[in-house]
Amino acid sequence: MENLIRVVIADDEALIRAGLATILQASGDIEVIGEASTGEEALTVAQRLQPDVVCMDIRMPGGDGLEATRRIQQLEPAPAVIVITTFDMDEYVFGALEAGACGILLKDSSMTDLVEGVRRAALGEGLVDASLTRRVIAEFTRRKSIFTSSSEVLTPRELDCVAQLCQGMSNNEIATTLFLEPSTVKTHLSSAMAKTGTHNRVQLVIWAFRNGVVE
């Protein structure tokens, strides 16, 4: 099949890697091309195989997922990184988002959410597990200096797109709601990220809540 989404799974537990691989490959449009059991190995495998998406555990021996995420985001091209975790609101999770991870999923998320998360990450879109969104935003909002905001003001259309993004919508869904082309939505959101100093959609959503764009 053409245009398969190429994925690397990084987790120190072999059973979890096997389970994730089985779920993803059953989707029909995702191929697991590599695995890693440490953060350092995740970086090496990502450099060698150049996947579209890395599913990253945070707490691993031999270099944790936080440092691996930061270094993977410096690759050219840089794959999208999804953090898959038990999530206990610790510094590792927030650090991974700050390092450029495009989303968070719980290890007990549904198979549908996992597959959809990988698909959205491959499209350059972010995903935060619905049960975590409020907690993630609340914690980031509490912090004083996470992203460097520009003094530039977003245009009304950029604000519209960001507001819809905060509802968890994809590009296509935002386009339908605002009667725009998906490519136009992507342009508006890219511009908004550049102006706000954010590096992906999850960070842009957090910026929007911190700056009162949405309640």
Image: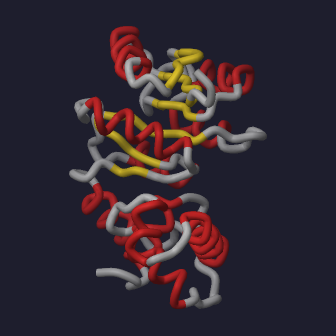
Name of the residue lying farthest toward the right: 76
Q: Nearer the viewer, residue 37 or 114?
A: 114
In which quadrant of the rendered view does residue 81 lie?
top right
Tell me residue 69's x, y (percent).
58, 39
Q: Quadrant of the C terminus?
A: bottom left
Q: Toward which corner of the image does residue 50 lie, by quadrant?
A: top right
Q: Residue at x 34, y 46 (%)?
A: 90
| Label tally | 0
Depth check: 73 or 23 in front? 23
- Identify the residue at horizontal 55%, vertical 26% (top origin): 7
The quadrant of the picture occupied by the N terminus is top right
Q: Is residue 39 left or right of residue 45?
A: left
Colour scheme shown? secondary structure
Residue 71 position, x and y percent, is: 67, 38
Question: Where residue 31 sits: x, y (%)?
Answer: 53, 20
Residue drawn 40% across the image and 83% down it: 213
Q: Is residue 98 above or below residue 42?
A: below
Q: Residue at x 47, y 69 (%)?
A: 175
Residue 91 vs 11, above or below: the answer is below
Could one spot residue 148 in this view of the protein? no
The foreground one among 192 and 88 is 192
Q: Based on the displayed image, in which of its 4 quarters is residue 34 positioned?
A: top right
The x and y percentages for residue 89 are: 30, 48
Residue 160 appears in the figure: yes
- The answer to whether residue 81 is above or below residue 151 is above
